Amino acid sequence: MREREARRRRQTDELIDRIAIDEFEAYHEHPSLEPVVIVMAAYKEADNIERVVKAMPAVVNGEAASVLVVVDGEDDGTSEIVRRSGGYCVVAPVNRGQGAALRLGYRVARQHGARYIVTADADGQTDPDDLARALGPVMADEKDFVNGSRRLGSTHGTDAVRNTGVVVFGRLMSLLMGTRVTDTANPIRAFRADLTASLLLEEPQYQASELLIAALSSGVRYGEVPVTMLTRHKGESKKGGNLSYGYRYGKVLLRTWWRERLSRRSRARSPRG
């Protein structure tokens, strides 16, 4: 029963993705994205997105960059603003969650010319100057995956509970993965575009921990760079209250860790030819 439900969910996701990609290619007339693609997921961010898109760099470490925003259903005008502001936009026909939106963004980016991907927030919490710092070690072939860290850098956020959660989840991740991780949910993540095609990514929401655990489990060269976490330009976070967010985020983190652990065990037991 569980496998049948998972298969049905994958089929539905593929249908939604295909509709979004077809519309994207038709609107942008089969675009060729730049070598660096800045991927953002947006849900009702019409008040913030123009300022965010226009602030993104056109060149990152000497390579031309494109901005790709994935609107996660319920478009409130965000897509029109993105396109008017010079960015590319993929519009999912239904709301699924940030994880599903980012997966779609990774897919579109790598299928349309991206060599490198760096993620950012659509609400203005990302400092554009930090993107080059995160991508630098990847573009120099020193690291495969680089995470931004507000603990190594700074944060403008004053929510004591959320800031404490960053520390707690960082320590938990470090313990489980045997790799020092200081900020598991930072919006800035940099990697080669083809990496995302080799990882199992299936969480509809809270994909930051899933992506990080899947990448670490695959043996990537991992690194962190200090970044600045800003506050939202306008509006409120869609993540919900601290307790409910922390519970759901932790649940995804542990579920992904267990999944990858079982996968490693299975591979270890498989006979080699």
Image: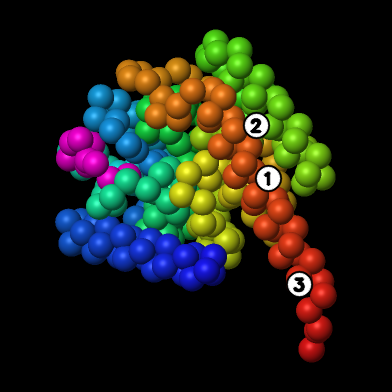
Q: Which residues are magenta?
A: 72-80
Q: In this picture, is 45 found above or below 160?
A: below
Task: Tell which of 3 and 223 is nearer to you.
Answer: 3
Image quadrant in which the C terminus is located: bottom right
The amino acid type found where label 1 is placed reads: Leu
Task: Tell which of 71 and 50 is nearer to you.
Answer: 71
The residue shown at (58%, 65%) is 198
Q: Which residue is mark 2?
A: 183
Q: How is the image coloured?
A: rainbow
**Residue 178 shows up from this direction:** yes
**Residue 185 included in the magenta stretch of the image:** no
SS under mark 3: helix
Q: Position of residue 265 (x, y in %)?
A: 79, 66
Few, some or many residues within 10 Å of mark 3 (<14, 14–19, 20+): few
Image mark for residue 267:
3
**Residue depth check, mark 2 versus mark 1: number of the one nearer the observer:** 1
Q: Exactly how many numbered labels are in the figure?
A: 3
Residue 113 in the figure: left or right of residue 185: left
**Residue depth check, mark 2 versus mark 3: number of the one nearer the observer:** 3
**Residue depth check, mark 1 versus mark 3: number of the one nearer the observer:** 1
The residue shown at (68%, 45%) is 254
Q: Earlier in the sequence, mark 2 or mark 1?
A: 2
The residue shown at (49%, 70%) is 4
Specify the quadrant of the image occupied by residue 52: top left
**Residue furthest out toward the bottom:** 273
Few, some or many residues within 10 Å of mark 1 (<14, 14–19, 20+): some
Q: CA distance from mark 2 to mark 3?
A: 29 Å
Q: Earlier in the sequence, mark 1 or mark 3?
A: 1
**Residue 73 included in the magenta stretch of the image:** yes
Image mark for residue 254:
1
Q: Position of residue 208 (x, y in %)?
A: 56, 42
Q: CA distance from mark 1 to mark 3?
A: 20 Å
